[in-house]
Image (cartoon, grey):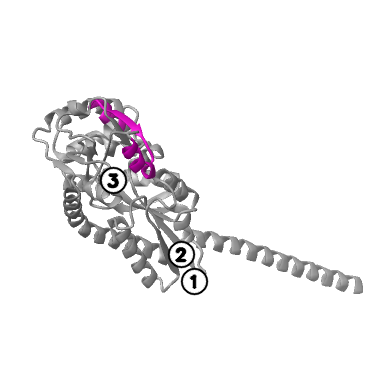
Amino acid sequence: MKKVRKSIILLLVLVLISVLTLGCGGSDKGATGGEDKKAADGGDKNTDKQYSIKITHVLAENHHYTKGAAKFKELIEERSGGKIKVEIFPNAQLGGERAILEGLQMGTIEMGIITSGPLSGFVPEFGILDLGYLFRDSAEAMKILNGPVGEDLSKKMLDIGIRNLGFIKYEFRSVYGNKPIKTPADLAGIKIRTMENPAHQALFKALGASPTPMAWPELYTGLQQGTVHAAENSPDVLAASKQYEVAKHYSLTNHVFNNVMYMVSEKFYQSLPAELQEMVVQAAKEAREYEDTLIEQDIAKALEEMKNAGVQVYEIDDMTPFHEAAQLSWDEVIKNIPDGGENLKKILEAEGRSK
């Protein structure tokens, strides 16, 4: 009888040990599940954690990019209750646009305000937006950028670790340099600085120029020393950079729309709790809208400043030769862009034209 009792007691002890062991194992699994849910819900849930954002761009401190960044800083610091602090780095302090894109990918830079030009080297599909004379005015451009084509392109940015927080309503790029440009023939043999963008380069080759990639911080000296004879950008950029000191002719070719985005590092974005993610998205939206209100006025001021500094500004009477030359470059460009033909068709259909 005693042996039976001992056996029963031993059996109960073994059962109790097994229950306790299983209980501990279940607790570990639950902790892992909790971590997964925390990540899915949007990053670290430590509500006391502080975050820092470096927001950067390549243009001057007095440019509307900086004013938009300052509005973002004001909004996010106030709404986050100081959990997010923002530092603004204008004037290529953290590198050119390609370097900024690489920093966003790695998470060493949290935010940037950048054109789509260099982005096509990371997301080739974006090259479709840089075709010469693709858009007839800024309203048409924004319709496409904020529509299905722009949304699809923005999703592809996530594959390289960058999130698009939206486009600003900007301005067209035009040519400036050491001589007026009134016809494509005036561009023959001209070395013109371009971004490292196949669509831009193909456009100027079709117009008879010699496209020369050059980093933005090097351009003032390049124009001054004659390394390049011309460049192209919107009036506010020319004025803010003071490049009109070494380039006295501005010709309103209006050849490519400046597709400019507020971007955030996906690595940084996913480190934020969901509540702060939403604040970043909303603050960026309001900062973009604020910047939109400044652009038209800044363009007018820039043209006036340039003229006062002795820059000759030229209207072009007949744009047809420019349009015709540009369209010759389209086929060459889109064959190297994934889904290029399909996206071009969608854009032209949305614009109500065939080409």
Q: Dot 2: few (<14), some (14–19), or many (≥20) neighbours within 10 Å?
A: many
Picture coordinates of residue 216 (x, y %)? Answer: 36, 43
**What amino acid type should be assigned to the residue bearing mark 1?**
Thr
Q: Answer whether residue 214 is magenta in the image.
A: yes
**What amino acid type should be assigned to the residue bearing mark 2?**
Pro
The residues bearing labels 3 and 1 have C-alpha atoms spaced at a distance of 47 Å
The residues bearing labels 2 and 3 have C-alpha atoms spaced at a distance of 43 Å
**First in sequence: mark 1 or mark 2?**
1
**First in sequence: mark 2 or mark 3?**
3
Picture coordinates of residue 16 (x, y %)? Answer: 75, 70
Residue that badge 2 annotates? 273
Residue that badge 3 annotates? 243
**Which callout, 2 or 3, points to the residue nearer the camera?**
3
Helix, strand, or loop for circle 3? helix
Determine which of the numbered discs, if any, sits on residue 47 in the image: 1
Asked which quadrant contains residue 205, the reply is top left
Tell me: 205 left or right of 25. left
Q: Which quadrant of the rendered structure holds the N terminus?
A: bottom right
Q: Main secondary structure of the magenta part?
A: helix
Is 17 in front, or is 64? Answer: 64
Q: Which residues are magenta?
A: 201-225
- Label 3 near label 2: C-beta < 8 Å? no
| Image vertical order of residue 97 relative to residue 61, above or below | above
Picture coordinates of residue 256 (x, y %)? Answer: 23, 39
